[in-house]
């Protein structure tokens, strides 16, 4: 298959935002819509996506690694990400798939960097080492008021995890961080209002994804 956008046949979409914004539901909806158009879709998530990365997920989200601080947690996320990129994301992009990843390196920038206080240069150095040139083509950032998001989480079953259990100040910083990432990366990121209805959000997101898929098809024909 001919290389297209960013020199590869596939499209790499990441979904980002705070807790309880509805990323997973949106990911499922986009995957379904794309598959209906005959697109080869790989759905994955971070931390996770490979056996090793899922083990790291368990360690970090249980809170067992909290004693290492933001730096140690960022190293663990980077280790999981490097494995995920090598074993799942790159091969899928190389064969022309649409990869939909629920969280990726912007989560490290926001959670361990902006909200966790980890130095910007360290965050970027780890990102470079973990992903190389395998960055997203499009990142949809779901923006929601942390109080509304907390309300949504309370309505869901289950208990909180390492980051859900952080206080309001942390979640407010996170929201600001994701908004800033969107502002600083206007070519790659789109900020979407996650408080709107699920259908409207899905339709808005699909228009953006469709645009990138169409650009890829045109580039492949050129
Ligand atoms: P998950 O249950 O997938 O959360 P959500 O449904 O909100 O996406 O848990 C992932 C948690 O890990 C989430 O709180 C964000 C956090 N995280 C980081 O702090 N840094 C990272 O690099 C990644 C990928 C996730």
Image (cartoon, rainbow, N blue to C red):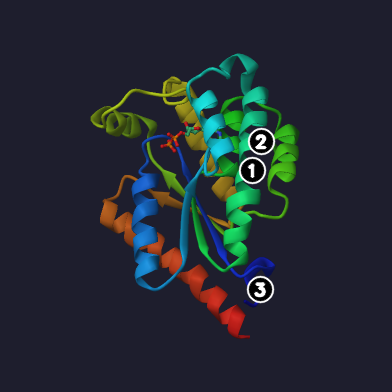
Q: CA distance from mark 2 to mark 3?
A: 28 Å
User: For mark 3, what is the residue?
Assistant: 3
Tell me if I can see residue 167 in this picture.
yes
- Mark 1: secondary structure: helix
Q: Nearer the viewer, residue 135 or 53?
A: 53
User: For mark 1, what is the residue?
Assistant: 83
Residue at position x 52%, y 44% in the image: 49
Q: Is residue 130 above or below residue 163?
A: below
Residue 79 is labelled as: 2
Which quarter of the rendering shows the C terminus?
bottom right
Name the front one of labels 1 and 3.
1
- Mark 2: secondary structure: helix
Q: Position of residue 37 (x, y in %)?
A: 38, 73
Q: Position of residue 128 (x, y in %)?
A: 73, 45
- Mark 3: secondary structure: loop
Which quarter of the rendering shows the N terminus?
bottom right
Q: CA distance from mark 2 to mark 1?
A: 6 Å
- Do callouts 2 and 1 mark residues in contact (Cβ within 8 Å)? yes
Q: Is residue 151 left or right of residue 182?
A: left
Q: Position of residue 136 (x, y in %)?
A: 59, 55
Residue 211 is labelled as: none
Task: In the displayed orientation, state which residue is furthest to the bottom.
Answer: 222
First of labels 1, 3 by sequence position: 3
């Amino acid at each position: 298959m001919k290389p297209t956008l960013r020199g590869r046949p596939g499209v790499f979409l990441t979904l980002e935002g705070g807790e309880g914004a509805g990323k997973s539901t949106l990911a499922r909806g986009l995957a379904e819509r794309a598959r209906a158009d005959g697109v080869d879709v790989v759905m994955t998530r971070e931390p996770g996506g490979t056996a090793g990365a899922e083990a790291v997920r368990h360690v970090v989200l249980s809170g067992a690694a909290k004693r290492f601080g933001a730096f140690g947690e960022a190293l663990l996320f980077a280790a999981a990400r490097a494995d995920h990129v090598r074993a799942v994301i790159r091969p899928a992009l190389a064969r022309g798939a649409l990869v939909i990843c629920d969280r990726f390196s912007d989560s490290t920038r926001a959670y361990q960097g902006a909200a966790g206080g980890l130095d910007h240069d360290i965050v970027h150095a780890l990102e470079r080492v973990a992903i190389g040139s395998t960055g997203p083509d499009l990142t949809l950032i779901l923006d929601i008021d942390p109080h509304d998001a907390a309300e949504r989480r309370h309505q869901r079953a289950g208990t909180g995890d390492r980051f859900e259990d952080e206080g309001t100040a942390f979640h407010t910083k996170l929201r600001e961080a994701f908004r800033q990432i969107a502002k600083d990366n206007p070519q790659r990121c789109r900020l979407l209002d996650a408080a709107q209805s699920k259908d409207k959000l899905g339709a808005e997101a699909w228009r953006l994804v469709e645009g990138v898929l169409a650009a890829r098809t045109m580039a492949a024909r050129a």
